[in-house]
Amino acid sequence: MPNRTSEPSVLLVRLTSLLLALAAPVLAVEPEKAELTFGFIKLTDCAPLVIAYEKGYFEEEGLYVTLEAQANWKVLLDRVIDGSLDGAHMLAGQPLGARTGFGTSARLVAPLSMDRNGNAITVSNEVWEQMRPHVPSGADGKPVHPISAQSLKPVVEARRAAGQSFRMGMVFPLSSHNYELRYWLAAGGLSPGFYTPTDSTGTTDADVLLSVTPPPQMPATLQAGTINGFCVGEPWNQQALFKGIGVPVITDAEIWKNNPEKVFGLAEAFVQEYPNTTEAIIRALIRAAQWLDADAGANRKEAVQILSRPEYVGADFEVIANSMTGTFEYERGDRRALPDFNVFYRENATYPFYSDAVWYLTQMRRWGQIVEQKPDAWYAEIAAQVYRPDLYRKAAEGLVADGLMAAGDIPDTDGYRAPTSEFIDGVTYDGRRPNEYLAQFPIGLQGQGQ
């Protein structure tokens, strides 16, 4: 005889299960691995990761993510390689350097670009006072931007004559910060030095000595007098300004307009083992980038509030907002509109262009991290191995099908952006002709013969 007293509870359990099933999101792809740990460095351009987490985009894609701040770029890189991190907010040069074997050898891929622009170069107050007489002024008496490193050259030469070295910090040998700082110095007639088989510091024949400092430590290192200036991402330039210990003199957007910055890096083995998870990650990050750039930056203040939390960037709201909300302050009171200082989605900022990868490779060659001259085809081959627009397109096309992305936001491209001369020195860059590009520079190793 059936136990009828249990029937209501059985029906309740079944009804609850049905309701939960109906409430569960219908996933575009079913991730093979749902629980993930991603690394980041405390910079404002970690925003796509943070927003994907805080706004629930990861969960909507079936991913349960833990975000972990890392001590420095080397630790972050090593942890992605050994698998203790599933992926990370990564310097664009890191997966490329690992593929070429500079410093660390590993097979990493970059299926998504996280942003454009976002860095600046800051000098100490003392150095700025010495530079200022060499910087042209506008009718309002304020410095004319962009400021060339030619205004720094007499300061460096005076110190050399007095037997003193001039030192500047950057965050990692394979960072955009290293290459942007070197580009700016060289465009002003100053040698930033070269890497050689016997000099891993990159200071051979240097007028300005560059060294590595983790981003959050830049202001304190400048204040201590260990360095005379630095190139770093935000908010650490504005932090130095707010603390009254330094003056930002140029942004990277003024060195190269809409330059590629961070990527999301994954081990190639991860992508091969977890293709659906990879697609879900890319979808979530694209959606976060959209949110960050939506409605002419209407969400940026909320983003700044989130980023200012100690578990993320951990700087004051005002410091982060000074650049993240479309302005940038050079000297105190000299705040200027820079709506493109941080670009996360506009200008196809999330697309992993081969030409962006090739530019990084040219800088590695220019400064000796790639020891031997390589043919143009080599640059294209390495770029295609690391930057993966095929993975991006699959995820983006899925978003278009789901009504979450406009079809026109996926660029119609063979992977190369159009040639551009929007650099501080006016040199033209064509990613299809890397050796021709390198041959234009009076300072730096040439593509041919060196």
Image (cartoon, rainbow, N blue to C red):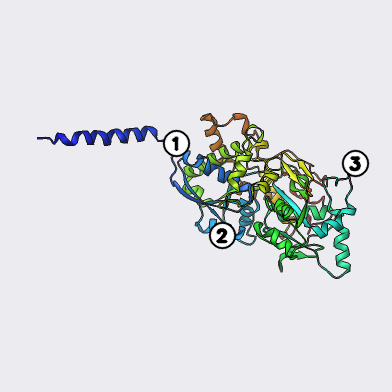
Measured as percent of width and height from the top left, residue 273 is found at: 47, 48
Q: Where on the picture, by quarter, is residue 323?
A: top right
Distance from Cα at disc 3 to Cα at disc 1: 58 Å
Camera-side mark, 3 or 1: 3
The residue carrying pointer 2 sits among few (fewer than 14), some (14 to 19) or many (20 or more) residues within 10 Å by Cα, namely: some
Name the residue at 54% across, 38% down: 395
Specify which label sits upstream in the sequence, 2 or 3.
2
Specify which label sits upstream in the sequence, 2 or 1.
1
* Residue 75 badge: none
Please say if 276 is above or below 295: below
Q: Secondary structure at mark 2?
A: helix
In the shown orientation, is residue 344 left or right of residue 424?
left
Tell me the amino acid under the disc marked 3: Ala
In the shown orientation, is residue 253 left or right of residue 190?
left
Measured as percent of width and height from the top left, residue 407 is found at: 59, 29
Pointer 3 residue? 139
Q: Is residue 300 visible?
A: yes
Pointer 2 residue? 78
Tell me the amino acid under the disc marked 2: Asp
Tag count: 3
Pointer 1 residue? 27
Measured as percent of width and height from the top left, residue 232 is found at: 70, 54
Task: Out of 1 and 207, give the one closest to the viewer.
Answer: 1
Measured as percent of width and height from the top left, residue 184 is found at: 79, 52
Q: Quadrant of the C terminus?
A: bottom right
Q: Is residue 374 visible?
A: no
Distance from Cα at disc 2 to Cα at disc 3: 51 Å
Q: Quadrant of the N terminus?
A: top left
Disc 3 and disc 1 in contact, CB within 8 angstroms: no
Q: Secondary structure at mark 1?
A: loop
Specify which label sits upstream in the sequence, 3 or 1.
1
Distance from Cα at disc 2 to Cα at disc 1: 32 Å
